[in-house]
Amino acid sequence: MTSAKCEGLKRAAEARCLSDLLLASPPEWLDAPLLYARQPDGQWQSQSRIGVQQAVLRVAAWLEAMGVTPGDRVGILGHNCPEWYIADFAILRLGAVTVPAYFTDPAESVQYVFADAAVSVIFVEEGEQQSKLAGMNIPSLTFHGEQQSIASIAADARWDNRLKAACPDREDLATLIYTSGTTGHPKGVMLTHGNLLADVEAGIGGVPVFADDLFLSFLPASHAFERTVGHFLPSACGAGIAYAESVTTLLRDMPEVRPTLMISVPRLYEKIYAGVDAKLAAGSAVSRWLFRLAQRLGLNRFNRRRQGDDLSAVAAWLWALLDRLVHARLREKMGGRIRAFVSGGAALHPDIARFLLAADIIVLPGYGLTETSPVLSVNRQAYIKPGTVGPALPGVELKCAEDGELLVKGPMVMQGYWQQPLATAEAFDADGWLRTGDIVTIDGDGYITIMDRKKEIMVLSNGEKLSPAVIEQHIAANPCVQQVMVIADQRPFVTALVVVDQAILQRVWQQAQRRPLPAAWRTDADLYAWLLARMHHDEHDLASYMQIRRFAFVDEPWSQEAGLLTPTLKLKRRKISERHAELIDSLYEEQP
């Protein structure tokens, strides 16, 4: 297994371009399954690495024949699938530039991205995604011929040995990834082959990946996190990639695929935590006692092992027994083979991290941004600090500005924003350090704690400053709370908009109050006071001025489709505030 890791490190370091990660594979990997997808009959079908190589070269030759040349931009719009992977690697091998658009974005946003990038060809998923291109006016779009599927091109042997273009170099532009952003139009982040290869190499140094690993992919491949860590990195290490049908099918897909590694965002772990908590609330007192004991022993075991120690013989025996009774079932629902989850996109609440670690489910919180290809730091499996995003990856230079903003240098840092020289200049300080926009602390071991986005720090009308993300993280640990957004900027006190999971709320309320959830629960004073008290309990370690005084229920969850969440499920605060402006104002009509 160690040699496989070294092989991935060596291949990423020596690759001329990203397509080498696939096309320059060792002979022993060629017949191994690389890509898996569920077929219409419900069965999972795999494609070998050599088969994918052939498909990539044929599609690259077809693109070249259609007039695409090195440096041209080519769009991709669709859900994660083998065809997405093949299209991306074909574009990269040709020396063209991949421009992915988010399948969750509305037509207007998709068309803006493709027009701004001046794409010449677009690979698009049939159906709903294709309809987003209707009426699109992009002068640069040169290919208007008969539509062809990637599958038909990949199966056509006439494209064999037709590719003339030389492999691109590390300095060549590989992709434009448009930042999802929470305000305004997205900007195209310019990443070279060298940027992404440097991050792949650093990532392998931080998280061991082996040729017998299997990733389950469900975050959008158009996002830098999934594309680098769940797409390029396994390609470098000989690992396989299975594509979940959607986020909603994960619980079905995981036990069938039995992945060993997954890339995810905190929302998945919050849902797991909430589901377990709600089940315990509806269960017996004995089951709750056993769970708490298993968690206590599991966390003690984790902490001791982190220090090079272990449980006593009696405690280890008891833990093994309780683990089989309590935690093993949870792991089996995830397929039973998970070595680690790599978590990014937002901060993971320490309590949720400890809950998973106690269950022997390894979660490695990390941090990065699109502008850095994207990963900058990650917790190491040998030493995990819940609440942090780990130390810097190899090759990453970090420092804090006077105001606490994290500044970065390294080979994975972007070239700039596409056709936006002013925005590019503003992104770097006078010494060439990239401004991340995140306020952080760094401890003596180099472990980073994200405090908040610099632009999202809120100031109460009395001048007190606070981090909405910190407050939201505390409140989101409540299993009843599905989503929460804090309001405080230029206001006299802190309030929040809350989306609850009604099914979980009903079970937890029934357990706590010994009576059914009121029919008009949204306006029930007793329920409101009870839930506010639970929030205050979750906020007990926050300063009093940071604690929520009032909240309001929001009926519909915020979604990407509604334009209220980014692809990594971050809140688009301005848009949510605009949608619920009257509700927010009502929270401040009278002093509490």
Image: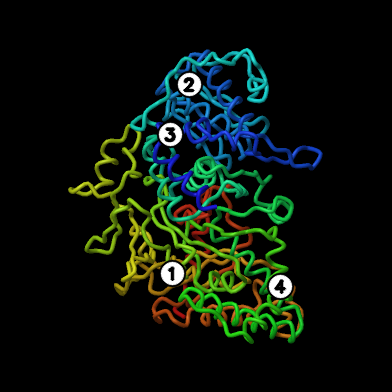
| Pointer 3 residue | 175
Say whether residue 362 is visible: yes
Q: Quadrant of residue 506?
A: bottom right
Secondary structure, mark 2, is loop
**Residue 567, which numbered label?**
none
Give the percent coordinates (x, y) of residue 347: 47, 63
Nearer the camera: disc 2 or disc 3: 3
Nearer the camera: disc 3 or disc 1: 3
| Pointer 4 residue | 520
Label 1, residues with CA under 10 Å away: few <14, some 14-19, many ≥20: some
Nearer the camera: disc 1 or disc 4: 1
Tell whether label 1 touches label 2 (CB within 8 Å). Answer: no
Secondary structure, mark 1, is helix
| Pointer 1 residue | 470
Please name the amino acid that badge 3 sits on.
Answer: Thr
Q: CA distance from mark 2 to mark 3?
A: 14 Å
Give the percent coordinates (x, y) of residue 242: 65, 44
Q: Residue at x 62, y 54 (%)?
A: 260
Q: Residue at x 62, y 32 (%)?
A: 83
Q: Is 177 above or below relative to 145?
A: below
Q: CA distance from mark 2 to mark 1?
A: 44 Å
Q: Residue furthest left?
A: 430
Q: Quadrant of residue 146?
A: top right
Q: Earlier in the sequence, mark 2 or mark 1?
A: 2
Q: CA distance from mark 1 to mark 4?
A: 31 Å
Q: CA distance from mark 3 to mark 4?
A: 51 Å
**Residue 120, which numbered label?**
2
Give the percent coordinates (x, y) of residue 111: 50, 31
Q: Earlier in the sequence, mark 3 or mark 4?
A: 3
Please name the amino acid that badge 1 sits on.
Answer: Val
